[in-house]
Image: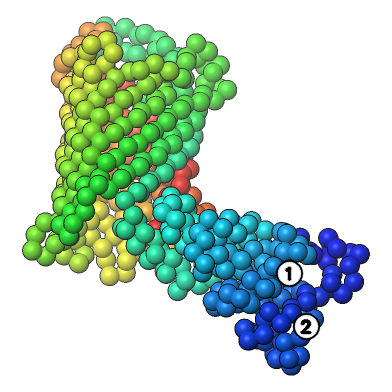
Amino acid sequence: MRRSALTRHRNMTSVGRRLYATALITGFGLSAVGVLAEETGGNVVDIPLDEARIAAVNAGITGNVPLARAIAVELLKIDPDDADAHLAMSTVHLSEQDWEAAFVASKRAFRFSDVSVNRYHAARVAAAAAIANKRVIPAQYWLRRAGDLAPGPVQRRAVERNFRLLRAETPWSYKFRFSAVPSDNVNGGSSNAVLEIGEENPEYWVINPASQALSGLTTTAGLNLAYRINQNADGQTSLTSGISVKRVFLSDEAKEQAPDFDADRLGTTSLSFGISHARILGEDRKAVLRLNGGIRDVWSDGERSYTAPTASVIYADKLSDDVQLVLQLSAENRFYTDSSDALHASTAGVLSYTFPSGASVSGLLSYNLEDARLPQWDSSTWAAKITYTFGKPVIEGVDLSIGAGVTLSDYPDFNVLGFNGREDEGVFAELEATLTKIEYAGFSPHLRLRRAITESNIDLYDTQEWSFSVGIESNF
């Protein structure tokens, strides 16, 4: 809350209650201040503090630099934490092209103010100062804060437009993601407690508790940075980097079930570097081809696990105003520290249609192939999913989508405990929601409820899972 100058200077008489505007404001009058100055011939004028604050902010926003400076200086003498005075001074510094001073003053105005519209203006000044000072990441952050506090849809759209322009004009870009997923099966363990072996004379083995489903929490955080090194009318090339951290925490119940299980081995940390090139195709310029290549290092349980060269090709084409097609092919070859290696390759296609109402439906079909470190883990998996996104909020401030799909996995060389071949069939359903009314820096909470069931010809690999994830998603 803004600290009152009257509270801090109780022993002051007229100075504590009034701000003296001298002949400095003569000729730069605005609203009530200008009228008072005019009436007194430019002599000393008594102005109530609240009116002076309003006048200082209005003068700063409308570009009346001398008046904004004069009033702000006097206000700051009375209260160094006066939010309105700092806002006025930030616009003064901005007009003088003192970018660092403008940035500092606007941050102070934002910090001390409890008026939403003034915090909006302070965020805009901070963004402008950061842009002018070539500080791209802070500029994007403060534009996002301005978007949070935009007083209306017109201002909000203007902030979003400026953000897109900034992202297009500056070589740096970043993406941040975070999710926390409570689940009753964080380890992908079996939903059975007993393994049945054989048909005519079956044997029953108790499945190790550590191989059964364990409940807990999975957290994932990631940051991706890109720096554009070349751009022309037909495409652009960027250097990319990223870090991703995944950690798993068992519930107290799971710790009792499997006291010797070390959840740290489920956690991973990966660091990647690469290059990406995107090019616009076709006479109508509605298709985009993106080529990515790089290298990724992965650590597990505190030790380096493998290094993997990666490559992918993505083709996106807007077939019509309502239909879009995306095709992707990717592969990585993992070289483990024990000198073994494994090849992972996948291809996927997504076809989506947008209805006149704004709702959309999309279908995904993918195929994954793994040439594993050990032959019995070689596998191929088909997956299909359909997703429907509601055009108009079913609940005000909540964007909803629902999806369902199937997976079919085959392990042709699987040969363990007398089983020859393994086949898994899975089904899953998801409900996703973005709470757009809850926003910070242009990010809103993203929720996902998921139910997945997999049935295998080997009881050990029957799995069931309920999970609920909480993450963040950018609104622009």
Of 435 and 285, nearer the camera is: 285
Q: CA distance from mark 1 to mark 2?
A: 13 Å
Q: Amino acid at mark 1?
A: Glu
Mark 1 crowd level (few <14, some 14–19, many ≥20, 10 Å Cα): some
The residue sitting at 32% across, 58% down in the picture is 169
The residue sitting at 49% across, 64% down in the picture is 97
Residue 44: image x %, image y %? 78, 82
Which label's residue is closer to the chain start, 1 or 2? 2
What residue sits right under mark 1 in the picture?
74
Q: How is the image coloured?
A: rainbow
Q: Is residue 416 left or right of residue 137?
A: left
Residue 186: image x %, image y %? 43, 27
Res. 45 mark: 2
The residue sitting at 17% across, 43% down in the picture is 291
Q: Is residue 65 above or below residue 35?
A: above
Of 91 and 472, nearer the camera is: 91
Residue 68: image x %, image y %? 63, 74
The residue sitting at 23% across, 11% down in the picture is 339
Q: Is residue 343 left or right of residue 247?
A: left
- Identify the image quadrant of the C terminus: bottom left
Which secondary structure, mark 1? helix
Mark 2 crowd level (few <14, some 14–19, many ≥20, 10 Å Cα): many
Res. 325 mark: none
The quarter of the displayed image where residue 429 is located = top left
